[in-house]
Amino acid sequence: MLCRLILHDLLTCLSPVLGNFVAVSISLILLWIFGEDTLEPVWRITFGIGCILPLTVFWFRLNIGNSRRYREEAIKSRVPYSLSFRRYWKRLLGSAGCWFLYDFVVFPNGTISSTIINSFVPDKSLLKTAEYQFLMTLLSFPGIFLGAWAVDKFV
């Protein structure tokens, strides 16, 4: 049975990596289908497919009501934010700092990596750059599982 920490790490860190993998895979497949000369359908279809899941989640959230227990127990008075901040500022700073470092490393990888890859790809081909991007995406998966193991082992 998986430990709670492993499950938490996999659910929080695997989803962006899996989303990046699916996005790069779709782009690569569409580049193979349409070629590098007709990029208009490639980006439009990729963008359209990328909109499906968030719109589905948004639709379900709008149509699913809150539970009776939540409505009864929802905060009915003013929340003492200053007291909460004074008591939990170290945990808040630690959590925010960890997420900042994670975002600082992960998101530029997806944003800038095509520029970096294009600088050492010999033929400057968009398809070849996308293939290297796909390879870099695959290399993210062992890090997720290694991180889950490390959290379970050392925390």
Image (spheres, rainbow, N blue to C red):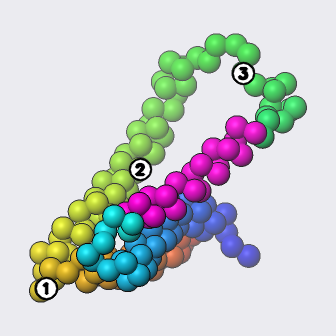
Q: Residue at x 33, y 64 (%)?
A: 40
Residue named by callout 3: 75
User: Is residue 63 toward the left or the right of residue 124 in the image?
Assistant: right
Q: Nearer the viewer, residue 119 or 141?
A: 119
User: SS of the residue at dot 3?
Assistant: loop
Q: Nearer the viewer, mark 1 or mark 3?
A: 1
**Res. 93 mark:** none
Q: Quadrant of the N terminus?
A: bottom right
State the image quarter where residue 6 is shown: bottom right
Q: CA distance from mark 3 to mark 2?
A: 27 Å
User: SS of the residue at dot 1?
Assistant: loop
Q: Is residue 62 magenta?
A: yes
Circle nearer the N terminus (3, 2)? 3
Q: Is residue 6 magenta?
A: no
Residue named by callout 2: 99
Does 8 sit above or below residue 92?
below
State the image quarter where residue 84 is shown: top right
**Whole-percent x and y of residue 77?**
70, 13
State the image quarter where residue 5 is shown: bottom right
Circle nearer the N terminus (1, 3)? 3
Amino acid identity at mark 3: Ile
The region drawn magenta spans 43-63
User: Is residue 1 toward the left or the right of residue 40 in the image?
Assistant: right
Circle nearer the N terminus (2, 1)? 2
Amino acid identity at mark 2: Trp
- The secondary structure that most of the magenta stretch takes on is helix
